[in-house]
Image (tube, rainbow, N blue to C red):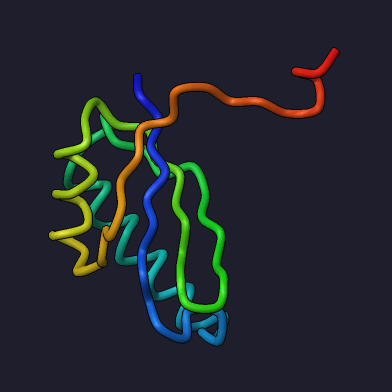
Amino acid sequence: MPKYVIEREIPGAGKLSQEELKGVSQTSCNVLRNMGPEIQWQQSYVTGDKIYCVYIAPDKEMILEHARQGGFPANSVSEVSAIIDPVTSE
């Protein structure tokens, strides 16, 4: 199943409290439960004004539907073509 990186522009994301991040996470998980097991959230990285999320889904449209239902921006959705890490250099 394809993996996607989603860039969400959220001004002040890096200043969100743990409670606010918990609320965003709960909203996302509720939407995912309603959408079914085909779409899975792996993890997200919070930076100053953006959140980068990693999802597994059958297609980009499902990622965009999750964003629409959750009320999240999905400014960029990119399918991962390869994964590399330090072991790749060996």
Which residue is rendered at x = 35% and y = 40% of the image? 78
Q: Residue furthest front?
A: 89
Horizontal side, residue 50 vs residue 18: left or right: left
Pick the front one: 11 or 54? 11
In the image, farthest residue toward the right: 90
Image quadrant occupied by the C terminus: top right
Residue 61 is situated, as x and y percent measured from the top left of the image, at 14, 39
The image shows residue 36, relative to residue 8, as above or below, that is above
Where's residue 8, x and y in %? 36, 64
Q: Is residue 16 above or below residue 40?
A: below
User: For the image shown, how many numbered marks are present on the structure?
Assistant: 0
Q: Residue at x 51, y 84 (%)?
A: 16
Residue 4, by quadrant, is: top left
Q: Is residue 8 left or right of residue 36?
A: right
Corner quadrant of residue 9: bottom left
Residue at 27%, 48% in the rendered image: 32
Q: Nearer the viewer, residue 87 or 28?
A: 87
Q: Quadrant of the N terminus?
A: top left
**Residue 14 screen position, x and y as percent:** 56, 79
Residue at figure coordinates x 58%, y 25% from the top left: 83
